[in-house]
């Protein structure tokens, strides 16, 4: 029987055939990020163990990751704790030959769970329409893994203690693949069948029966994560996903925030502070390449005050006569009459983020230096402080500088489509703010800059 979910050659873009076996470097996250949902205030906490979910994902799947987490939040037991581990770009695990950026992380779940208790595995292209605790609490009848079939394990309930001797981190690091791990499970008699409604692939079941909906057909996934690789079509159940995204937008939901950033955030700030100790590092000279673009936005919007979010040491600016010696306000001759407030968490004189609005917010050397999970909330901060416009520059190539720990200073390397998506998602929450994005790429013939704004075709449609 033909596979109804298969993506055929005619669903592929030409780029797929040029890059069908992408080199996937090892990730850099030494510890996966965990989103913990505590019992909701006002509910008596349950005595049951936390529902542990391990999500296979990658930075390109940000939209899907956010809505997966949102779906859990909407269907959870408010009296119970939930822990969602984001298995993304994990350090120490080679990914050569993987079809996705997270293919074999699922077999490291026993290790990540401390070889004890239970864990649910989900691919990122899924949403819950029911409480995952119902699956978590199923009677496993002594089995180590429940899935809808031995072959299809994109949703699993795993007894981590039982599977610990069979699915080891060492085997994952050694490059063992599906055949090995599924073979061990089968040979030891540890496979058990999971009801199909917990991995309902593109509408196998009537919607009222579906517990976990899996958008498994790559070329009909509603959030369209790889448009350079696939020719996307519509999904009959795509409205369920889009309705969830709309609700998450209306609630202003972000997975990470300034109050609760990623685990990487503080460490990266510490490293940048260390680099700032060298006088010419992050001097702020990159601003000079964008003075004219900013001048156009100032003229168009009538802006008189700007926040330079990530100004570095602000060497392109001049002090304002009459301002105190420790003032973070600056000016530049190209923008006469405009006052610029400098902010950079890595440079002590500018390290305090002002809690006020400015006519415009500019950021020319920041976003690629963040962890990918922190990019959305940082861009949101920019929009929240802008009355009239936001201008962001994203470098889409490796930096010449390295961090003190040896990592490339551009810690988020993504294509223009990804950055465009982040800007549009933020802009939807601030409809009265104009925005412009510049994406810089490097090719064999030099740099190429692409601009996006509200008039550009939306990456969300």
Image: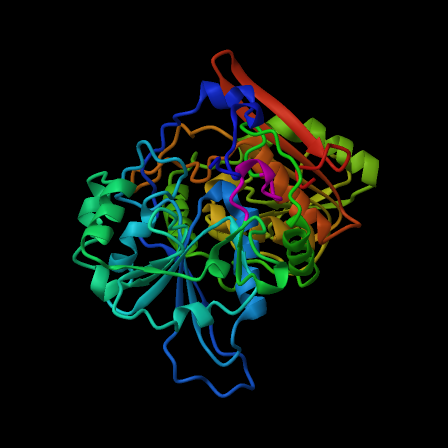
Whether residue 23 is visible here, answered yes or no, is yes
Give the magenta part as a residue range: 215-224
**Looking at this rendering, what residue extends furthest in the front direction?**
1
| Horizontal and vertical percent position of residue 194 | 40, 61
Whether residue 326 is visible here, answered yes or no, is no
- Which image quarter holds the C terminus? top right
Q: Is residue 31 left or right of residue 363?
A: left
| Horizontal and vertical percent position of residue 169 | 22, 50
Seen at 59% across and 31% down, the residue is: 227
Residue 223 lies in magenta, yes or no?
yes
Quadrant of res 354: bottom right
| Dominant SS type (magenta) | loop
Seen at 41% across and 45% down, the residue is: 272
Q: In the picture shown, does residue 48 fall above or below 366?
A: below
| Horizontal and vertical percent position of residue 76 | 52, 71
In this view, the residue in front, 141 or 374, is 141
Seen at 38% across and 42% down, the residue is: 275
Q: Is residue 74 left or right of residue 405?
A: right
Q: In the picture shown, does residue 44 fall above or below 31?
A: below
Q: Is residue 429 left or right of residue 310?
A: right
| Horizontal and vertical percent position of residue 338 | 74, 41
In this view, the residue in front, 130 or 396, is 130
Quadrant of res 391: top right
Residue 99 lies in magenta, yes or no?
no
Q: In the picture shown, does residue 349 fall above or below 6?
A: below
């Amino acid at each position: 029987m033909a596979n109804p979910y298969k993506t055929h050659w005619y669903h592929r873009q030409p780029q797929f055939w040029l890059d069908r076996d992408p080199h996937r470097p090892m990730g850099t996250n030494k510890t996966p990020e965990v989103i913990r949902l505590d019992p909701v205030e006002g509910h008596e906490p349950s005595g049951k163990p936390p529902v542990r979910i391990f999500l296979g994902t990658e930075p390109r799947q940000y939209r899907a990751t956010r809505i997966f987490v949102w779906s859990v939040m909407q269907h959870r037991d408010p009296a119970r704790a939930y822990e969602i581990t984001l298995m993304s770009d994990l350090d120490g695990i080679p990914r050569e030959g993987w079809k996705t950026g997270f293919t074999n992380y699922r077999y490291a779940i026993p290790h990540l769970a401390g070889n004890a208790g239970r864990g649910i595995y989900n691919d990122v292209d899924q949403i819950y329409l029911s409480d995952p605790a119902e699956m978590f609490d199923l009677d496993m009848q002594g089995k180590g893994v429940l899935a809808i079939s031995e072959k299809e394990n994109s949703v699993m309930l795993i007894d981590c203690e039982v599977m610990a001797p069979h699915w080891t981190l060492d085997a994952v690091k050694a490059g063992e693949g599906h055949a090995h791990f599924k073979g061990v499970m089968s040979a030891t008699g540890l496979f058990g069948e999971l009801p199909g409604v917990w991995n309902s692939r593109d509408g196998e079941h009537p919607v009222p029966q579906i517990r976990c909906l899996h958008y498994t057909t790559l070329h009909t996934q509603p959030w369209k994560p790889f448009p350079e690789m696939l020719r996307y079509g519509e999904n009959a159940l795509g409205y369920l996903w889009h309705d969830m995204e709309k609700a998450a937008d209306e609630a202003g939901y972000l997975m990470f925030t300034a109050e609760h950033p990623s685990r990487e955030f503080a460490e990266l700030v510490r490293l940048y502070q260390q680099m700032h100790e060298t006088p010419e590092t992050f001097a702020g000279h990159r601003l000079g390449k964008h003075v004219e673009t900013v001048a156009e936005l100032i003229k168009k919007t009538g802006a008189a005050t700007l926040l330079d979010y990530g100004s570095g040491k602000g060497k392109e600016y001049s002090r304002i006569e009459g301002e105190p010696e420790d003032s973070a306000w600056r000016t530049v001759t190209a923008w006469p009459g405009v006052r610029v407030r400098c902010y950079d968490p890595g440079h002590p004189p500018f390290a305090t983020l002002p809690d006020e609005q400015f006519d415009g917010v500019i950021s020319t050397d920041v976003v690629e230096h963040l962890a990918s999970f922190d990019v959305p909330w940082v861009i949101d901060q920019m929009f929240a402080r802008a009355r009239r416009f936001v201008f962001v520059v994203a470098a889409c190539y490796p930096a010449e500088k390295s961090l003190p720990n040896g990592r490339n200073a551009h810690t988020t390397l993504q294509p223009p489509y990804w950055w465009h998506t982040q800007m549009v998602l933020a802009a939807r929450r601030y409809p009265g703010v104009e925005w412009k994005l510049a994406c810089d790429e490097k090719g064999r013939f030099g740099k190429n800059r692409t601009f996006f704004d509200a008039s550009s075709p939306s990456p969300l449609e």
